[in-house]
Amino acid sequence: MTKLNIADKSLIRQINMSAILQVIREKEPISRAEISKLTGLNPATVSNNVSDLIQMKIVREIGSGESSGGRKPVLLELNPKAFYIIGVDMGTTKVITAVTDIEGKIVKKVVMRFPKDRTVKVVIDIIKDSIYKVIEGSNIEVDKILGIGMGVHGLVDCDKGISIYAPAFDWHNIDIKKIFEDEFSVPVNIDNDARVMALGEKWFGRAKNALDFVCLNIGTAIGSGIYLNGELYRGSSFGAGEIGHINIVNRGPRCNCGNYGCLEVMASGPAIVDRFIERINCGEKSKVIDFVDGNLSDITGEIIFKAAIEGDELSKTILNETGRYIGLAVSVIINLLNPEMILIGGGVSKAGEFIFDAIKDTVFQKSMKHNVENTYIGPTGLGEDCGVIGAATLILKDIFKAPKLY
Ligand SMILES: [Zn+2]
């Protein structure tokens, strides 16, 4: 049995420093006295740790605050330019890579597409290339980079840093952490892409104050990240949140997972296009056909959305149906988990009211009234950057919560 070694002063010191950093991050600008009050640490401990943080240039002093009688206290804030993080949002068709500061603000971002031939080597090389490009474009010194956080689609063992299964690349058990740590010599943390989005929303987006919420990623594939009681929930073997594979229609099309009629095969970006083309092949008319000069293979979800804005009836119908399918899945989540918020991100969420109105209508019809009354349903707060900021947060959460600064 392991015993907590209370004599381990360096561990206690790290925990203290982490607590102080966390309070500064959340409450800045803040005085040493307030930090002491909020953390319960004695003033001398706060003062010593703050001195070290100032010396490490992670924290800086700014002006003076209001006095409660005596000398005006000096206020402290994070120095966002001290260190940087690389965030990698690895989707199924493209990778978005960004340098962020320690407050989650993007300094530089690059987007690179994967070719049709997506072997492990091709995908890994493109991601490495995107990291080199973003570092070069950001003009920051390499030794200021604290680590690389990556959101990876599919099943991910975040403890070992292994991509267990990524359906779009058909790869199994790829040791992502080792590959990128060997290449860049900084710590690498990975997690599932939708879970990473939820993490980003919790730290920097719309869910900062929420304890129970679910973030859906609806793009080329569909997944979700679940926060329960303030903690990211991964399930017993990293498989929690696979909302894309809830059965939505009987006898529907075949899904990547081997089943039929899953949400992903009805409401993902490619599924929207497939359902649209099916209706065109049955003789229905749409201005989308003019947009693509009659080439059905050029139709994308974005074009259907554009046509809907211009009043195209078939496009509006297809998007409305999509919203209803998503709404059915969301009502399951609401009845099962009773979350405060359902946040929806990914390419499909860009269809705005054409989808959100139908989602909300369906959710109100299908959920328990008590559960749905106070639930917020809407887009993510970080929009397109949600995945990449969330990925960077995989490193930030280690710095602010389980400190390994040196
Ligand atoms: Zn499926």
Image (cartoon, helix red, strand yellow):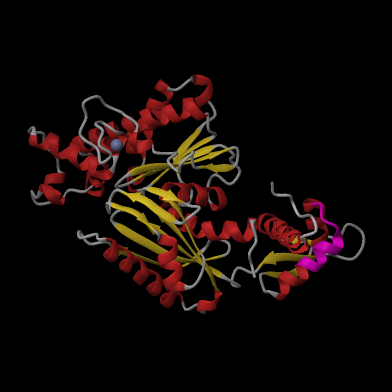
Residue drawn at x 40%, y 57% as measured from the top left? 89
Where residue 307 sits in the image (x, y, percent)?
22, 44
- Is the stretch drawn in magenta largely helix, strand or loop? helix
The extreme front residue here reads 1
Please report the residue visible at 47 percent of the width from the left and 51 percent of the height from the top. Answer: 196
Q: Is residue 276 visible?
A: yes
Quadrant of the rendered image holding ligand 1: top left
Left or right for 43, reference 132: right
Query: Relative to 335, does residue 26 appear above or below in the rendering?
Result: below
| Residue 124: image location, x then y, percent | 33, 65
Comparing 10 with 363, the one in front is 10
* Residue 19 image position (x, y, % from top left): 71, 56
Q: Is residue 108 visible?
A: no
Q: Please identify the quarter of the rendering in which residue 216 is found.
A: top left
Residue 110 lies, with reference to residue 204, above or below; the image says below
Residues shaded magenta = 40-49
Quadrant housing residue 151: bottom left
- Tell me if residue 156 comes above or below residue 144 in the rendering: above
User: Magenta includes 48?
Assistant: yes
281 sits left or right of 209 in the view: left
In the image, is 333 to the left or to the right of 48?
left
Q: Which of the pair 103/233 is nearer the observer?
A: 233
Q: Is 212 within the magenta?
A: no
**Residue in the picture at 76% in, 67% down:** 50
Name the residue: 36% across, 48% down.
154
